[in-house]
Image (cartoon, rainbow, N blue to C red):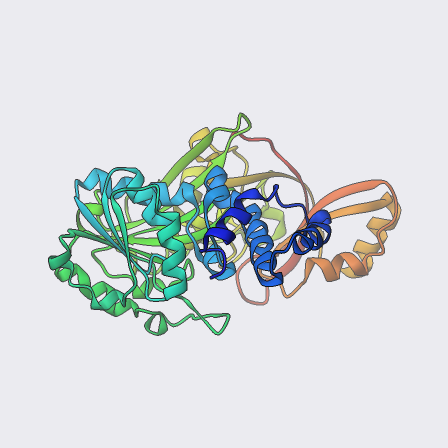
Amino acid sequence: MPLLTPEGWALLGSLPPYDEAEALRLAESLREEGHSPGLVAAALSQQRLRARAEAKFGPFAASMLFTPDGLEQATRLSVAARHAARYAAAGVGGVADLGCGIGGDAMALAGLGLDVLAVERDEATAALATVNLMPFDRARVRCADALGIDLRAEGVDAVFADPARRAGGRRVKDPEQWSPALSELLAMRQAVPALGLKVAPGLDHGAIPDDAHAQWVSVDGTVVEAGLWFGPLAPEGPGRSALVLSTGADGEPRARRLTDPACTDPSAAPEQLEPVSSTAQIGELLLEPDGAAIRAGLVAELARRTASRPVGTRIAYLTGDTLPDESLTAFLRCWRVREVLPLNLKALRARVRERGIGRLEIHKRGLPVSPDTLRASLRLKGDGAETWVATRVGVRDERDRGAVLVVEPVPTKR
């Protein structure tokens, strides 16, 4: 890698913050100074990646090295810190980070004073991890196959693994096609009970062992991962939970956790709730659970705690008349329902025309309707604005009806 030379490192360190509008001019200037085109391209690409990486790594990004795939797959620092806290609380001494990638999780582990063996089989990626972990004396990088490490000989008593879930630029859905395969990683808990796995958020609940605590994580409303935790890394015991990380209005990070005390088996099918039977039963409020709660199968628990019901069979919108308690607002987006309309294109066009609606925010669940397509077909024009929720209402039979709920947001403290 050309940047891992004295000239490349010096050039990278001399560059100003990345500015796309100035990138071409800067490249020409650097080539005129005598730098090779390849080195200039590598340095500017790295600056562009560092700018993108600030969302995941904050100020640490300015001194790290990345690849596009490595950055995309890396754990956000706020989430990696949560991972590391589990290991620190469990009292482990040495952690093997198997499939460490560019080293994001290893940085968080070492930052809490743990001895870390970061293992990555791709030589170029291992080199980047070595650079990124240079500030941490207790971290070492090994270029090797994750399954070829003798954990006992290395003196580690805990494992964190993030299997590769992409091949040829595409996501691999089958966990037995991950690298390493999920079953191979799960087998490690026989030798090292303190095992943590980062897995795809869409992992089928049936693939989750009964002794795992499965936790789905969202950051600022976006589901970013699921984790399987075993032994001393799961003090909450087997089950499932949702962790919502957000940034408050004051800029401070916030974390909220939701569990279902009645659910101890994460492989069990989620409870089926009886939805409303018609649009006439839609309440004053529409509640949308956070994606982490949906993935964790905790919609029924949220419905119970808010005295609400689903608007339709297997639809993750809830409706009721009571604002959620402040302890739950991190897990629920809340709207006040102003009107309920039939999903009829002619009638919707008439509404848009009569009310002069030029701006329309559309959300949808359970219907083969694209918000962009629907919006384009409505011929928006005017200064008016509305928010619509298009969804299926009722049980899944002849009483099923598509409906449009005209809503407005209800401010809540998240």
Q: For the point 22% across and 46% down, which residue is it?
A: 233
State left or right for residue 184 relative to residue 12: left
Compared to residue 38, the image places residue 130 above or below, namely above
x then y, percent, for residue 43: 56, 54
x then y, percent, for residue 76: 44, 47
x then y, percent, for residue 161: 29, 58
Evaluate whether residue 236 shows in this view.
no
In the image shown, does 51 or 344 lie closer to the viewer? Answer: 51
In the image shown, does 80 or 280 lie closer to the viewer? Answer: 80
State left or right for residue 388 relative to residue 293: right
x then y, percent, for residue 138: 24, 43
Q: Report which quarter residue 119 is drawn in.
A: bottom left
Number of labelled discs?
0
Q: For the point 29% across and 67% down, which residue is it?
A: 182
In the image shown, does 8 or 396 lie closer to the viewer? Answer: 8
State left or right for residue 186 relative to residue 305: left
State left or right for residue 17 relative to residue 219: right
